[in-house]
Amino acid sequence: MTNTEGAPATGQPVLSLRGISKHFGAVSALTDIDLDVHAGEVVALVGDNGAGKSTLVKILSGVHQPSSGTIRFQGETVTLNDPSAALSLGIATVFQDLALCENLDVVANIFLGKELNPLQMDEVAMETRSWTLLNELSARIPSVRVAVASLSGGQRQTVAIARSLLLNPKLILLDEPTAALGVAQTAEVLDLIERVRERGLAVVMISHNMEDVRAVADRVVVLRLGRNNGEFPPDASNEALVSAITGASNNSVSRRAGRRQAQAAHLSESGQ
Amino acid sequence: MTNNSKPGTPAAQPTLDRRDERVAHSAGIGDTIRAFLDRIRSGDLGMLPVIVGLVIIWTVFSILNPVFLSPNNLVNLLFDSSTVGIISLGIVCMLMVGEIDLSVGSVSGVASAILGVLWVNQGVPAGFAILAAVLAGAAIGFLYAQLYNRFGMPSFVATLAGLLTFLGLQLYLLGSSGSINLPYGSPLVRFGQLMVMPAIVSVIFAAVPGIVMLYTGYRTAARRRAAGLSAQSSGGIIARAAAVTIVAELVVAYLNQGRGVPWMFGLFVGLVLAMQYALTRTRWGRSMFAVGGNREAARRAGINVRAIYTSAFVLCSTLAAFGGVMAASRLASSSQQAGTGDVNLNAIAAAVIGGTSLFGGRGSAYSALLGIIVIQSISSGLTLLDLSSSLRYMITGGVLAIAVIVDSLARRSRASHGRA
């Protein structure tokens, strides 16, 4: 939070969710979710498997529609009926499954649905812009004219992130952005998230990796079983985060840690 | 450093797209051929199987009966190819989005019945009758699209229902007479049976693709160089344009030894080229590939997936209806037999044999052109050998089976070589 203090947009959130619920039949994936994201802020969304993180991202990107609740974007109430509505508002998403067309090349995927000059596509301009975007990400893509099918997982991730930046969005949603990446690429993506924040964009990042979360997030929002379960500063203790994520101070993570501590203590005692 | 900078300027900065040292870049003709062979080996076959198949088929038939390769037989073959070829072009659109239309034969039959009833029986001017027939096709396609988009009816089932429904409609329209003869000597029938290009016109048309390739090739290369991207060498552009021009001029010169190039075939080739442009150079075409490749990804990229499906269904049925009109002009009649029998499967087989994948997201308009020439060659060759239609069906079926096997194997090979 500290580095957004004093910025003009801090007072009003870019994105503001109130009472968002989503039911899939009898299953309540999300119940009464509240979330505020300010410009120039990175909010990490954490939670166990099935906590509703990806569902929330899909609602914000227009893939799913909420069963109830309001979404305010830049101060106005909006409805996101389909992905193109979210895109045109300035909400870009990098999905967990990346949503790339494997039969198309990198340029075609980056510009999919936003091709320059629809009746006589400007391939030269699209290719140049693709290289610019990819070079900004320090991407290691051998050629933008190969089909995405022939790229590795990390390369695909970079292509998906490059695509989200194409339209100069105001809010970027990243669903597990570093899950498929190598050490260097992860650092690049974290650098990128910081660069995006410096440009005054809002970022929502889902991650299971607490190290990444601590490295870039300004706030950590915890979901548990489809409900808000606390908000933490990035320097909160691991125990506090884990107990919020799992819902109990006595959880499998703490039990395991306790056991290992006891073992270590036992070993050091017997060693003496 | 990449090897495309000239030996004299080793320090030259490589172009924007050639900075990754892991990529082999083709510099000369030798590299181009090597890259081509690599592509074939990994299962990216493109047009190769159909061209090889065509060479085999033509060799076999010309040995069995020399008349097969005579100019006039080939002219007839092109007349016959055009009608079903236009229908097959619509099938390419459907296969591109990963769906299929099994009713193109019936739709073409309905169109020919509408043409006969309106033009001959009702005395409506031929132009309006043709327009009505084609619009009826568009309406049928729109109906399929609604069934698919709103009710989630698989295209396979929707068009199978349509196959029966529109066959019934065709029989109903034609009534008890069963067939309507179109007037001989009318422009439409002459277009379908007689009209060929004057030799000089066909020679000019055959030169057009090469000139266009030369012009666009140079312009693209110049723009790419200006943008700091690698560009095709002038030699390569000239070589490709020259090859296309020589082949086209040789074909035309040979056909002009006989009756000449049919106008109807010229129309068909024109439609193929327009479709190829639309598929590869427009946003609509890119969306077709995207929907066929990964429907959900296309939707999340903001593409109106339903509209794309609708366009594919409408285009397919419209082209089927137009093909039906052309078939009526070819036969000078609207009959109960129009569009029945092997029309349906020939149109689908042509698209698949030509290299458009049944699995969606891969293909080109050229596959309709090459595929239908294969199918009609088999049909014409077997007719010349005086073989019955029973054998013709079996052999065409066998060729289709081989084409689908090649498609499946190539797909598997592409997957294991990391290509789309």
Image: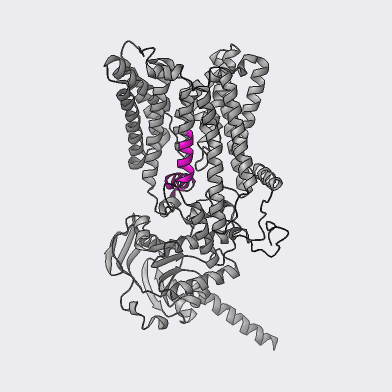
- The reply to whether residue A248 is in sight is no
User: Of all residues shown, which one is farthest toward the right?
Assistant: B7
Which x, y percent locates residue B411? 59, 42
User: Of all residues shown, which one is farthest toward the front?
Assistant: B200
Q: Is residue A29 left or right of residue B34?
A: left
Residue B286, magenta (yes or no): yes
Residue A216, magenta (yes or no): no
Which x, y percent locates residue B308? 39, 43
Q: Is residue B177 left or right of residue A186?
A: left
Predominant secondary structure, magenta span: helix
From the viewer's perspective, is residue B254 above or below residue A49?
Answer: above
- Residue appearing at x 33%, y 10% in the figure: B177
From the viewer's perspective, is residue B259 above or below residue A34?
Answer: above
Q: Identify the image's colour scheme: rainbow, by chain, secondary structure or one colour.
A: one colour
Q: Nearer the viewer, residue A81 or A122?
A: A122
Which x, y percent locates residue B404? 57, 33
Q: Quadrant of the N terminus of chain A?
A: bottom left
Q: Quadrant of the C terminus of chain A?
A: bottom right
From the viewer's perspective, is residue B292 above or below residue A123?
Answer: above
Range covered by the magenta-colored residues: B272-295
Quadrant in which residue A138 is drawn: bottom right
